[in-house]
Amino acid sequence: MKVIAHVAVNVFKESVRDKVLYNLVVFAVLLMSASYLIGELTAGQDVKIIKDLGLASISVFGLLIAVFIGIGLVWKEVEKRSIYTLLAKPMRRQEFLLGKYLGLVLTLFINVAVMTAAYYAVLAYMQAISPPNLRASWPAPATDPALLKAIALIMLELMLVTAIALLFSTFSSPFLSAMLTTAVWVIGHFNQDLRDYGATIPSALAASIARAVYYVIPNFSAFDVKLQVVHGQAVSLGYIGLTIAYGLTYIALVLLTAVIVFSKRDFK
Amino acid sequence: MKIHPAAWAALVVLFAAVIGLQMLQAAQPPLATPEGVATNLLYVRSPQVLRRATLSFQALLADIYWIRAVQHYGGTKLSKAPNKQYDVLYPLLDLTSSLDPYFDVVYKFGSVFLAEPYPAGAGRPDEAIALLQKGLRTTPDKWELAQGIGFVYYWWLADYQSAAMWFNRAADMPRAPDWLRPLAAVTLAQGGNRASSRMLWTEISRNADADWLRDQASFRLKQLDALDGIDFIQRIVDQYRARTGAPPTSWDDMMRAGLLRGVPPDPTGVPFQLEPATGKVTLDPRSSLNPLPSAEHPL
Amino acid sequence: MDAIRTEALTKHYTVGFWRPRPYLALDGLTMQVGLGEVFGFLGPNGAGKTTTLKLLMQLIYPTSGLAEILGKPVGDVAVKRRIGYLPEQPYFYDYLTAEELLHYFAAIFGYAPAERRTRAAALLDEVGIGAERRLPLRKFSKGMLQRVGIAQALINEPEVVFLDEPMSGLDPLGRREIRQLILRLRDRGCTVFFSSHVLADAETLCSRVAILAKGRLVAAGRLSEMLAFEVRGWELVVSGLKDEVLTRAQQRYHVTRATRLAEERYALELPLTPPPERTLAELVGQGAALVSLTPMRDTLEDFFVRQVSGAQPSRFSESA
């Protein structure tokens, strides 16, 4: 157990020293300049746009980190052979893998947490400077705590993408892993369309293929409640609970597969 | 490569759990789509801005907006919400055709479903005509577009003068089919009559390349058949009234009088209705051919 | 109990994606290394030395056969606490300093933070890394990385140490330091298993060696038993040797080889008989002068070359 923690902390250290967290600076600058500029252009719509922009940025930056670091998590150690000395130590292969995973999740968590703080700071500022009648027209307050629901599901999405990137990292090169992980993410977002497609097309074979893909590929579109939350629509805790259960189960499945693949590998 | 049996078992269990949870989620009611959220589909209202912003991917973006337009139309049509709106249909189609002016189906689809009255369509024949005219500015010699404009005038606006003028213009265009000129003539002479409408719809059903357009045409033809059927049955009912001095109270009366052999069905197989007080023959309200074109609504 | 034991250890690879061919990297290796020995694992490049070490560290899995360390099958986690490993051309994490790396590895062994620091500092001193220990590893030269590698292999005071080419990348001073380190380890009772293709090191350090060629074990045992240490000939270096004298001498004294070192200066290899003193006297009588007379003994290199060039190729070789 403690071994996993040490590996995880090491991954975090690496991302810090690789200056990954500088993306937070970019995010903060982006959000703040956008909020200023947009305030000059539109009347009344700025809070919605800032909310949209903030959530989208948290998601995109997180995804970039999850994919680009995730695909190298195992591959880099194998390629550079630093894994040789590590595995000769009293460490099981699965401890190594889980440590790597948790390290990146930790990095992502800190990333998302800091971004959320900056996000709420900007929104609080907007809340403060907007006149009361404008505020009354908003479907939800600027510093709406329900935004956290969307962010929590974004974090879950990032954890799943990281697991998938890690799985590919155990056996394929970075370029291929990046392509595959991104492809799975894109298809997973169009999952709803796959399901509708399956219901409307006449060919039974195509419909069953579409439905099979719908069930197997992770359903990322279910993690996306940004639209509802920005418009102040209720998202039930039951829905969130079910989605979290789904996400965690899928993560467990992917990690187990990664452990199995990794345990059987020869490091040539 | 041996895999421990416990690992296999765990894999199978997790996989089943994933699929099970996915099914649970699919069974849940979908998340609320807030009103006015349809505008999210557009993001940008101005076609010029959009064209410049998308650089070299206009055709692709046109496809995406086309898909959105179709989904918006379909989703709104199927929706049971009380105040559903098709208000972004025209903007979506406008954006799509600005991105890719040669995207033919956009004009045809738009003209049909923009003009179709609410709740099946947007009920905006003016927008339909605007869209078709936009198409003509890009490809001035596409007879289908001119014919489409004529059709909107004919069918939805009952403006037979304009309809005939547009049918004539269409007939002048290259590769125009033979039936346009006679159609223009008939329209001018006796616009609104069933025969010319039947001719128009028959040609559309024969020449249309899209299923939904053919389906429209066969539906319209059935409606015309229903009107013919009503007239025919009505004449028989009037015979009964002339014979007995009062209208029949039911189809049984007519059958006992030997005037009918059975209950007459409309083209979809649903029996016609007989109003006992007035002897008027109408469609069953549950028939899918409702609402029939009537005197107020052009034939 | 042996420190290391293998029995018919074999590793088969399939090479090639479209038409996979088998490649036998290691063919039926059976050997034992006793506790406290310094064991040299020798062979030319590609003989299977690194494959054997990877099998022992369970970085790869054997096709057949078994391997044990300290009486337990390889890969046993408890045993890993008692061993150390230095891979060939090691690479460590660029972004850590030498100190941080050793702290990290010490943490994996479960040492408390204070103990991690003491051990790391002591080992870095022992391998000769001074103030550079605070620099990130990306700034280290090959030789320094090698020293760090040795330090991390010893962080847990192992009972058995596995070193793959420990001298590579080191200058002569460094090599001497490592030789002395290995001897110190032996004196502490540690078993040292190292692979090398530099025979001079093996000659000075090892009590027993094994020689591998083309995936097969061609010789194993005590050095003293494998080499005949008797003199097998003489090397006579003379100056002032004129050409005619040389040609005559080559026939008369059965000179096996004559190497020209400079103008009229030659190194002559002579058999055991006739005695070299006689040959020397006669050459001197013809105007030559003695530079040196040295006995030739069978070296490990000669033995090695003989064994390796005589080795049969394994059942499936690369060219098949």
Image (cartoon, rainbow, N blue to C red):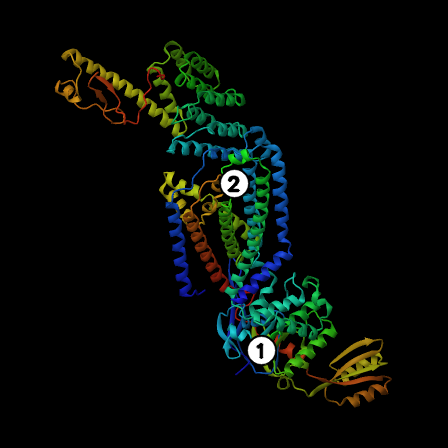
Q: Nearer the viewer, residue B78 or B39?
A: B39
Per the image, the residue denoted by label 1 is C218
Alpha carbon distance from label 2 to label 1: 81 Å
The kind of residue on which mark 1 rests is Val
Q: Position of residue B86 (x, y in %)?
A: 44, 29
Number of marks present in the image shown: 2
Q: Nearer the viewer, residue C8 or C137?
A: C137
Q: Residues within 10 Å of mark 2 (few under 14, many from 20)?
A: some
- Residue at mark 2: chain: A
The kind of residue on which mark 2 rests is Pro
Q: Toward which corner of the image does residue C137 lie, by quadrant? A: bottom right
Extreme residue in the front direction: A132
Q: Position of residue C228 (x, y in %)?
A: 65, 86
Left or right placement of residue C214 versus residue C64 in this view:
right
Left or right placement of residue B270 versus residue A201 in this view:
left
* Quarter of the figure that contains the C terminus of chain C: bottom right
The correct choice, above or below, for A80 with respect to B137 in the image is below
Q: Measuring 30% from the left and 25% from the top, which residue is drawn there?
A: B289
The correct choice, above or below, for C179 with respect to B55 in the image is below
Where disc 2 sits, the SS reads: loop
- On residue A217, which mark appears? none
Where disc 1 sits, the SS reads: strand
Labels 2 & 1 near each other (Cβ < 8 A): no
Q: Measuring 43% from the left and 29% from the top, which residue is drawn there?
A: B85
Extreme residue in the left direction: B256
Q: Measuring 55% from the left and 38% from the top, which residue is drawn there?
A: A47
Q: Position of residue B169 (x, y in %)?
A: 47, 15
Per the image, the residue denoted by label 2 is A141
Say if residue C285 shows up in the picture.
Answer: yes
